[in-house]
Image: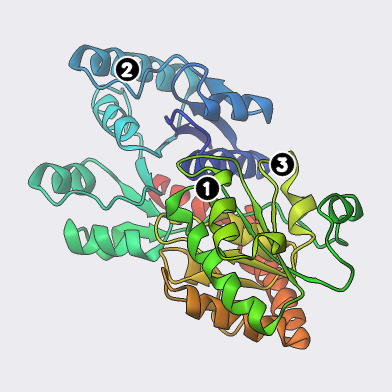
Amino acid sequence: MNILQLINVRWYNACAHYAVSLSCALKKRGHRVMVAGDPHSPPILKAKELGISTYGDLFLSHTSPWMIAYNVKRMVDLVEKEGIDIINAHRGESHLVAALATKFLKRKIPLIRTRGDVRTPKANLFNRYFNDKLTHKIITTCGVLKRSYVKNLTIPEEKVVNIGGGVDHDFYSPREGDRIWREKLSIPKGSLVVGILGRLSPVKGHKYFIQSAEYVLKQMPHTIFIICGEDAQVRADDLKETAQRMNIKEKFRFVGKVRDPREIISLFDIGVVSSVGSETICRVALEYMSMGKPTVGTSVNAIPEVVRHGVNGLVVEPENAEKLAFALIELLQDEPKRKRFGEKSRSMVLEKFTLNVFAQKTEEVYFSLLN
């Protein structure tokens, strides 16, 4: 197949990663894939870096009428010139342009809308018509989003397919804890390490992670907590002050953004996703799992779909530091369970969440439309 993936975001977020990693996986399965979006945008640059054909002359994030007309014309020319068989739009702006463009094509091209945005679709007549009549299939990245299409827009359930993301299981594979980082972070020998990886933002629930540490340390005083991620809406200094006020700062290690997250994840005895929102793809949980780590996550969006409670980790309600602490204590005190959950995490990735499985599920949707 000749596949056109449309992704327009101004940063390399989870939606962008979903689209680009899918493109790589489909290319490996023998398809010709092109990624199109805004000029010099992070998804376009990343796709180009990974050897995927790109087209960066669409201004999809600009929604003025004349710019929409410009984008429609450019997309029609692109699809005709490249012999595109399938169009997959990953954002609302590109979805609109693609839907309009298909009306001017010389041949019928299936249009798929992939939604990984946490915002549920607006329930109005235009949106219902747009998604039901002008779109051939909708792919959602988690069950919550699928249910929102079926319930809010009354889209037939068979038209909406849920396909979670995948992870590079060869890159994120089990390994010994990184000695250089262990020494650099002054982690005492024999300490157990609980870690969280992700941008510093309120939605990631770092404050509940820090609050949970106070409970944990009363029973497991030799535990070390790692917070890895760059400043965003929250600064690391603010989190350090919180830990200082609770008199537990010496038990925390703040790492910032790292070049290779595997080096930090390798130190974890337990990986944590304490998010209070977002996580419609939850890439970091898959990275923990692929590296054979037991995971404690909140019951938010896609997290319970990859972290199975009592199978490869524990799931707790969000914004509840005490329950998060109880889950951590349960695993910290039970080494055989940590090992069992970690092994199950890895086997689940190999069975359900590899990039090849991710691409194969998407490929089946594409072929069903072409057939």
From the viewer's perspective, tell me whether residue 349 is left or right of residue 23: right
Tell me the SS state at disc 2.
helix
Q: Is residue 142 above or below residue 33?
A: below
Depth check, mark 1 against mark 2: the one in front is 1
Most distant residue in the left direction: 125
Residue drawn at 15 percent across, 49 percent down: 128
Q: Is residue 117 above or below residue 192?
A: above
Mark 1 and mark 2: Cα distance apart in space: 43 Å
The first of marks 1 and 2 along the sequence is 2
Query: Pointer 2: what residue?
Result: 71
Query: Pointer 3: what residue?
Result: 258
Instruction: Locate residue 297, reporting x and y percent.
Output: 53, 69
Residue drawn at 32 percent across, 17 percent down: 71
Dot 1 amino acid type: Asp
- Front-lying residue, 227 or 236: 236
Depth check, mark 3 against mark 1: the one in front is 1
Dot 2 amino acid type: Asn
From the viewer's perspective, tell me whether residue 218 is left or right of residue 131: right
Residue 62, picture quadrant: top left
Q: Is residue 298 above or below residue 51?
A: below
From the viewer's perspective, tell me whether residue 229 is left or right of residue 139: right
Instruction: Locate residue 144, reporting x and y percent.
Output: 34, 64
Depth check, mark 2 against mark 3: the one in front is 3
Asked if residue 37 can be seen in this view, the reply is yes
Instruction: Locate residue 359, reporting x and y percent.
Output: 57, 51
Query: Pointer 1: what residue?
Result: 238
Instruction: Locate residue 172, reporting x and y percent.
Output: 75, 54
